[in-house]
Amino acid sequence: MTTKPTNTSGAFYVQAVLSFGLSLTAVGAGVVFLPVDGWVRAFLGIAMLYTVTSAFTLAKVIRDRQEDTYLSSRVDRARLDKLLAEHDPFKLDAA
């Protein structure tokens, strides 16, 4: 199965990975050094991890939906191309 090529550059990919890593580290450090009880810190840490995993799941679902739409439009386009290739406008129907 061939997929639609992406238009993202290597620099954009690196920027996205670094941005994610920096933001996760900053929030993690904020939770660790927050002057509260350990239970509150643990709750905030679990909430942060849940939010991150939910964001990854949402991104995957959106990507899968886009790929399904792209694939179905390719199939429809192939059917249309086949019909147009087989159609002969000068052919007379035998009655």
Image (tube, rainbow, N blue to C red):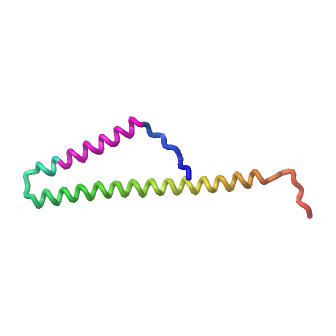
User: What residue appears at the point 33 percent right and 55 percent down from the top-left corner?
Assistant: 55
Q: Residue furthest right?
A: 95
Residue 13 located within the stretch drawn in magenta = yes
Q: Residue furthest top?
A: 11
Indicate the quadrant containing the C terminus: top left, top right, bottom left or bottom right.
bottom right
Apparent side of residue 9 relative to residue 46 in the rendered image (left or right): right
Apparent side of residue 40 relative to residue 16 in the rendered image (left or right): left
Residue interval drawn in magenta: 10-28
Query: Residue 51: horizontal and vertical position, in percent?
Result: 28, 56
Q: Please tell me whether the stretch drawn in magenta is mainly helix, strand or loop.
A: helix
Q: How many marks are shown on the rendered structure?
A: 0
Apparent side of residue 31 relative to residue 68 in the rendered image (left or right): left
User: What residue appears at the point 55 percent right and 53 percent down from the top-left corner?
Assistant: 70
In the displayed structure, 19 sits above or below 73; it is above
Displayed quadrant of residue 39 = bottom left
Displayed quadrant of residue 75 = bottom right
User: What residue appears at the point 53 percent right and 47 percent down from the top-left corner?
Assistant: 4
Query: Residue 9: horizontal and vertical position, in percent?
Result: 43, 37
Query: Residue 7: horizontal and vertical position, in percent?
Result: 48, 40
User: What residue appears at the point 25 percent right and 42 percent down from the top-left corner?
Assistant: 22
Q: Residue furthest front?
A: 1
Residue 32 located within the stretch drawn in magenta = no
Query: Residue 58: horizontal and vertical position, in percent?
Result: 37, 57
